[in-house]
Image: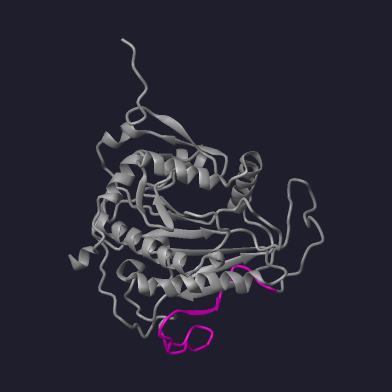
Amino acid sequence: MTTIFNPNEHPHRRYNPLVNEWMLVSPHRAKRPWQGEVAPPPREDIPVHDPNCFLCPGNTRKTGETNPQYDSTYVFDNDFPALLTDTPITSGDAGDHPLFRVESDRGICRVMCYNPRHNLTMAQMDAAAIRPIVDMWAEQTLDVGSHDFINYVQLFENRGAMMGHSSPHPHGQLWSNMRLPREITKELAAQRDYFNAHGVTLLTDYLAEEQRRDERIVYANEYFCVVVPFWAVWPFETMVICNQAVPSLSALDDAQRDGLADALRNLTVRYDNIFKTSFPYSMGWHQQPTDGALHPYWHLHAHFYPPLLRSATIKKHMVGYEMLAGPQRDITAEQAAARIREQSDVHYTQQ
């Protein structure tokens, strides 16, 4: 008896064209009994204002600086930055051996507060409250990227204690580099090669095919599409992709920014509704480098990497095979997309 390959039942590899890498899918493992860690759900009794929070309006930070009584978004230079503006620049490789290479790097790091309320998340904001966050991201990209020694601006958010955030106050971070980071270098090469070969951006063709198949799209409006990528690694991983091939957040017009705020609200609400908890994730925007060169192949998108797998407390860990061999997942991207898509667009706390 001949067995016909079924990607919903049999282990297989999927190709990620954005980074030119493969990952393993093992859908049959989703049927195995679970004997992993089970912890009580986290408490969510967070105050509107926390006098001990370094991000709340009017509070004093560790450096002695006092936050203004801001009523919308607020940005300040990170008090403990990962990169410094005055790092001496090496003229070349500063290592003393080909196997021990060293290069200095310079950068600017900032903290971006989304809202003055300490107990809000993006999922609990409406689109009108998210729109200033989009504008802040765009403004900060332009401002930091205008420095002649900054060649890339990375915007990201670590949401939830599970992801190691330093405060529950709604905020994200900006780290910028003189040298292109690893993931950006990989995506740049893949997008450039595809554009040179086909005359259109990689994500333009990818998004068109996702829209044609309609298997992994979880939310869409006129300007943005949220999709569980075909090559997703994290259980409920998604990408937010601009419908037009714009290179950066600062290139979005008013209508597109409104559309992005709407897409972010719908995605984060659905995330929270899956396990009736404030859904943790790491997310970040991938924009074109700010080196002054033209990058017509770059297509604006964001990655959401949430770790939750089976409940509000059980997450996927990158261990064993994932650390030593390559990324792997059990539930298929199509199953995850269906799970997200079926959630209500009304937050569970308001239902």
Identity of the residue furthest to the right in this view: 91
Residue 3 in the image: state x and y as whole percent: 33, 16
Placement of 195 over or under 168, stated as above or below? above
Residue 27 placement: quadrant: top left
**In magenta stretch: residue 197:** no
Residue 81 placement: quadrant: bottom right
**In magenta stretch: residue 78:** yes
Residue 295 placement: quadrant: bottom right
Between 133 and 205, the one lying in front of the other is 205
Q: Residue at x 49, y 89 (%)?
A: 66
Q: Is residue 37 visible?
A: no
Q: State whether the magenta stretch is mostly helix, strand or loop.
A: loop
Residue 190 in the image: state x and y as whole percent: 61, 44
Residue 126 in the image: state x and y as whole percent: 32, 71
Question: If the image is split into quadrants, where does the N terminus sit?
Answer: top left
Placement of 250 over or under 118, stated as above or below? above
Question: If the image is split into quadrants, where does the C terminus sit?
Answer: bottom left
Q: Is residue 339 left or right of residue 64?
A: left
Q: Is residue 326 visible?
A: yes
Count the marks: how many?
Answer: 0
Q: Which range of residues does the magenta coloring cover?
A: 57-85
Identity of the residue furthest to the left in this view: 351
Q: Is residue 322 left or right of residue 96?
A: left
Residue 312 in the image: state x and y as whole percent: 27, 56
Q: Residue at x 63, y 51 (%)?
A: 185
Colour scheme employed for the rendering of this structure: one colour
Q: Residue at x 32, y 75 (%)?
A: 119
Between 323 and 335, the one lying in front of the other is 335
Placement of 310 over or under 153, stated as above or below? above
